[in-house]
Amino acid sequence: MKEFDFITKEKALEILEIALSTGGDFAEVFMENGSSEAFEMTLGKVSQISYRNVSGAAIRIIKGNTEVNTSLTDYSYENLKNAAKVLAESFDGVKTTDVLEFVSKEVETVCNPTRVSSSDASEEILLLTKASSAAMSAHEEIKQVICGLTRKLQNIFVFASDGTYQKDYRCNMRLSVNCIASDGVSMHSIGKTSGKAIGLEQYDTVDVEEFARGVALDAVEMLHADPMVGGEMPVVINNGFGGVILHEACVHGLEATSVAKGMSVFCGKLGEKIASDIVNAVDDGTNLNAWGSINVDDEGTPSKCNVLIENGILKSYLVDKRNSKVMNHPITGNSRRESYKYQTTSRMTNTYFLNGKSTFDEIIANTKYGLFAKEMGGGSVNPATGEFNFAVNVGYLIEDGKITKPVKGATLVGSGRDVLLRIDMIGDNLSCGHGMCGSMSGSIPTNVGQPTIRVSSMTVGGSGKGGNK
Amino acid sequence: MTYQEIINLGLKKGISEIELYAKTSTDKTLKVFNGNLESYNAKEIYSLSIRGLYNDKMGYASCESLDESVINEALDKLITSCGLLTSTEVEEIFGEIVEYEKIEEALSDASEYPLSEKIDLLKTLEAETLKADPRIVKIGYCQYVETLGKVEIINSKGINLVRNYSYVVVVLGALGMQDGLTNVGYAHQIELSFKDINKDKLIKEVVEKTLSGLGAGSVATGEYPVILDQEVATDLVQAFSSLFSGYAAMKNMTMLNGKKGEKVFGENITLVDDPFCESSLIKVAFDDEAYPCKKRNVVENGVFTGFYHSLKTAKYFNETPTGNGFRNGNQVIPSPTNLYMLPGEYSQEQLFDGIKEGILVTDVAGLHAGLNVVAGTFNLQSSGYMIRDGKKAEPITLFVVSGNFFDMLNNVEKIGNDLPEKINDVAIPSLLVKGLMISGK
């Protein structure tokens, strides 16, 4: 990675020595450069292409319980030295810590992009054309189709006083299909994405047309669906993006940002039962080429598979270097940031429930009445209270063990403390969906996933009046 | 490279018209936790967005460095992208010499105060909030941010404009606990001057919000008269504000398409977009395309008067630009400046009057997920209070408030008189809505 060669080990050492000169316990420099590109196609026409070159650095010093950080766009050697000096002036002590010898760890490559772009963008445009055409011709009520392809390329270089000296190269590419169906009176929109931490090669094995057609037909189905009638009921949440329930209801509350400050309902619960016995969940940053995977995190720690919940028992939090000391908990390789503009902290990678023993058909057949949440949208949580919400993009009623009529506008709400204990059936069809997770350190790619699960009772919101039956 | 050199280089490469939009922002953020400075973050971020017409197509690129190699790559990417665009919308760069509204740029005095004074303020806020009530067990968020920003717009048609902005923000979030149940309350204040941060007001507000929600119960599913308090009404209108955008209209993503001049909301609804709003910290004389801003009623007595337009969307609809072309990343998306609803005459107590059983919604969550802007529908996690016999009663939580944005603004029975003193971005008074669906137990 030639981009960062101007910072030799000697220069890196010099910058860190300056940073530690006033008594800091730990100092780190994070540098990045790369680009974000977005292609947009509206009703089959290329309507927008934008290119953003990103480059900058962040320096941080930790002393005791205090972290000082600076982010700057000009990362020349002289500028880094000056910034380290100004930052070190935040403290008024004398040097107490030495910089350890730099070691670049041998890291197993879990993301290996091979075809990040085509030379004349023809492949990117062809992909969008295929998706657009399929969605536009899926149904006469499809009135708008906007497809997008985003590509983020990022070179990172992180070196720190604990001997960290790591470089990495990342590519995240994602196709989005957004369709609007209209019957002249009302409108309904549905969007869905497909992405990985590799380039165009990922779409060699995806039927893009089938994917886009599916989104379009969902939009039409939901246009004509009755509004969901709210209340408390069993909810069957489909595999794939359905895993947003684990992401929101639980794992945001396992991130050290909340736990270290005592601002999570899962504080002090390691080794305790937090979910029903059939629940097993992991955060695994090593899934081959997956959307949320990383070779190393933004502190240079190799990513790994962290078991979060084993047979209902809480096994681990997600912990970065700084909070590892505060919490006396091992580092889990989850420190992530959108860019040098954000302070890095513990975040998710690919987070999902493991397979259970039921089949999809068994779960539906065993549900007398409830909601089948086929496609989920996003959600949010307040980790301190555990109260969460997420939207159901495509829903159906389950009546007498069968999926019956479509319903729209359902929102699921609950408390993370209760909902995991109420999971009473887990399917054997694990898959993942691809999202962007926004939190303290910015917006980062994360996979959410699960097999189909059933929650015995949840509050379902909707604007429908009267009964669903 | 200097801006003029970049423009010259672009023109030399065959770009016929070129515009630079440069943004410099300096943020200082302090966080205090458990009596210690938890974090200090000083950011200096620069970004340059370039757009230019090449073969009559507008290309967009941006970068964070003025190095010649970076600029060269950005310009080349811009030119390449123009060759790939197939949409037929016409774009242009503004170059008329016009008189802009005179706006006095008041700059924050925050940098005149030492960091230690700001840290002390946070430590006092934390300590005094904890002391206020034994049920307040932790201050999870105690944060101070000062921002200093500069926007420069320079183009090959003679435009050369600068706009400065600055403000300070304090956010306080407390965790309350009673009988094992928790609640989190937040308060924040945005000011131009550091000395205007009102410590006592912040503490009073955060304590009230944290304690009053403790022990919240559930509510039975049904249709109720609903009061959306000022902050919730603001959140909702803000979340749906893109329905008024010419961009949404051009993309056929708004039910307001073709409804200019028609009555779309109740007669009591007037929405004003005021770029010069006296009380706002962000006053703008020109938008991010250098087009002059103007004050306008977007909705007047329920009648929709027309979309916000950028140069591009105005041209598409053969209308006049409205000075609402603001940058969203690389794109220019028509969006509001300071959008507010004309207040009514009712105090919050008067809004409660005559409601036998109703709901006061004081907080909604998941605004990015629980609404379908295109359809105009919302289904949002909420918390608030029951209203019984005309009075605020017990706290309730984890219910969903559902409705349709258009129906809602056609069914506003009373509008509160509580428009905030300072209008920043969007501000809507409390609204009493005749009936919204509430889902709970």
Image (cartoon, grey):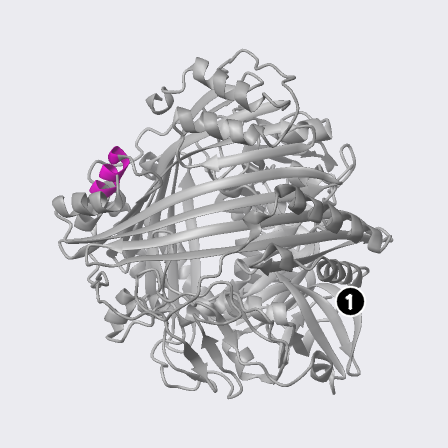
Closer-to-camera residue (A85/B302): A85
Q: Residue at left 51%, top 44%?
A: A442
Q: Residue furthest front?
A: B112
Chain name for mark 1: B
Q: Is residue B123 left or right of residue B43?
A: right
Residue B89 image position (x, y, % from top left) = 22, 63
Disc 1 residue crowd, few under 14, some 14–19, many 20+, Cα 10 Å = many
Vertical placement of B29 versus A142: above or below? above
Vertical placement of B345 versus A370: above or below? below
Quadrant assignment for the C terminus of chain B: bottom right
Q: Is residue A176 in view?
A: yes
Mark 1 highlights which residue? B395
Vertical placement of B6 versus A107: above or below? below
Quadrant assignment for the N terminus of chain B: top left
Look at label 1 and name its amino acid: Pro
Confirm whether the magenta stretch covers residue B69. Answer: yes
Q: Is residue A219 left or right of residue A415?
A: left
* Residue interval drawn in magenta: B68-76
Vertical placement of B19 versus A406: above or below? above
Quadrant of the rendered image containing residue B416? bottom right
Q: Residue at left 52%, top 35%?
A: A70
Confirm whether the magenta stretch covers residue A266. Answer: no
Residue B277 image position (x, y, % from top left) = 48, 72
Q: Is residue A132 left or right of residue A161?
A: left
Closer-to-camera residue (B114/B199): B114
Quadrant of the rendered image containing residue B66? top left
